[in-house]
Amino acid sequence: MVIKGALDLTPDLNPIAEGARRRIALRLLPFVFLLYVICYVDRANVAFANLRMSADLGFSDRVYGFGVGMFFVGYVLFEVPGVIVLERWSARKWLARIMITWGLATVLTGFVRTAGQFYAVRFAVGVAEASFFPGVIVYLTHWFRKDDRAKAIASFYCAVPAASVVGSLIATWLLGVQWRGLTGWRWIFILEGIPPIILGVITVFYLTDRPREARWLSGEERDWIERELEQESLAKKRVRDYTILQVFGDKQILLLILAYFLAHCGVQASTYWVPTFIKRLSGLPSSQVALLAALPGLVGILTMLGNGWHSDKTGERRWHTSIPLLIGGAAYLLLLSATHNLLLTIFLLVVGGGPMFAYYPVFWSMPTLVLTETAAAAGFGFINSIGQCGGFVGPYAVGYLNQRTGTLLAAFAFIGFSYLLAGTVVSTVRIRFARSLAEENLAVEKLSAAC
């Protein structure tokens, strides 16, 4: 269902174009979706493991929050260099390397005994995974025109809520097992670290770096997509041909970075703490908590696809990014007066966690409209790496506030205001979008006909 909705591309009068677009989508989107499901399951599985892990190892909320944040320290340090390597060398080979190494680091997490080991292995997972997400965004720009890009990114990014559902179901099963002297939370890491290693090997042979290398496209289809992407690149350069240094100093790019940082403070705090929130507010068994934690992901799949499709249809980006963040922020602030009612609390957590996913694909379609080539790789890596600092700040801030105040209310307020501020900043972004040569030629033809 997810992929089918994402493949419902805008009609094109040229049958060669239609065939190329659909063939590219069918070949690439299901596979990168699967890769990111595995990626996010491995990144966020610690949230479900923590339903037992901290109690078994004697970790406080502060220790857990800091350990979660260490992932993002390693991630940020290697993000920009990694994505530049991907762009200049080979996307498929670099993505394969990323997956194999993060799989190995995830398996090692199942054997931690001390806080120091927990910090070290989470840092290692972050280093291994660095540049995967922006690398795939860069990779998709090699294949999808701007008219299809929000839908393509939405299809890829639907893996995030889908992973929360998959992770919840796996955790529901594994938390209750005891195999070979190892408790269930350890098996969550061990078993979930194996698939990326296998898929990493497959990636080398399945993905194709550029359209000109795609033997699964006809010659006419290869020529068409290469011509379209080249025209789009030229159109961007006429608006402004960014260098890497100019990307780092552009006001609108800096606003996007600030918005992404604020959003990530809320997103990652929510991702890594929602199971704990539900357990402490409900007192339910861990297996039932894991199932309830899947609900925001189910809502997120629908809102992500719908918002990406509507954004491409209307051509509007800014408000399609801002409004979901504002809704998520309002839901978390309403939690401040709703914790006495469990059903209302779960509903607000779903509203706060579900629509929030909708902003991702549209947000990432914004910089793709103005950045090209190495500047795009550096720009996406720069936005993501600085924004991911929020992944350290958010989970740690929630752990600190929980321990300092003894309640969850301060954490809800922190997450809510992070979302509201992010949505407000996005609403101020003004990016001058480039028109393709084809669009300009069509406009000239219409003007000539009118004259």
Image: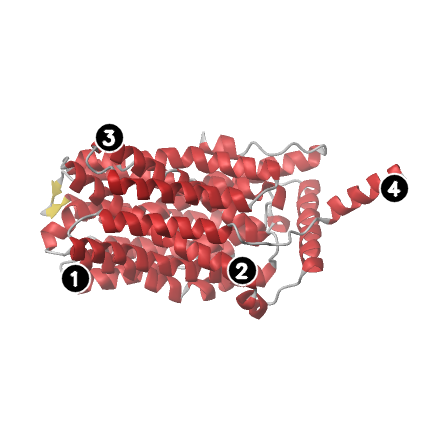
Residue behind mark 2: 253
Residue behind mark 1: 115
Q: Which mark is residue 224?
A: none
Q: Spatial distance from mark 2 to mark 4, Cα to Cα?
A: 37 Å
In the rendered image, the residue lying farthest to the right is 451
Q: Position of residue 193 (x, y in %)?
A: 28, 49
Depth-wise, is mark 1 or mark 2 nearer the camera? 2
Among the two numbered marks 4 and 1 on one chain, the one whose residue lies closer to the N terminus: 1
The amino acid type of the residue labelled 1 equals Ala
> In the shown orientation, is residue 317 left or right of residue 334?
right
Q: Would you place residue 151 above or below residue 267 in this image?
A: above
Q: Spatial distance from mark 2 to mark 3, Cα to Cα?
A: 40 Å
Q: Would you place residue 382 above or below residue 303 in this image?
A: below
Residue behind mark 3: 343
Quick one: SS at disc 3? helix
Depth-wise, is mark 4 or mark 1 nearer the camera? 4
The amino acid type of the residue labelled 4 equals Ser
Quick one: SS at disc 4? helix
Q: Quadrant of residue 77?
A: bottom left
Depth-wise, is mark 2 or mark 3 nearer the camera? 3
Q: Position of residue 306 (x, y in %)?
A: 49, 34
Q: Spatial distance from mark 4 to mark 3, Cα to Cα?
A: 62 Å
Q: Position of residue 274 (x, y in %)?
A: 26, 43
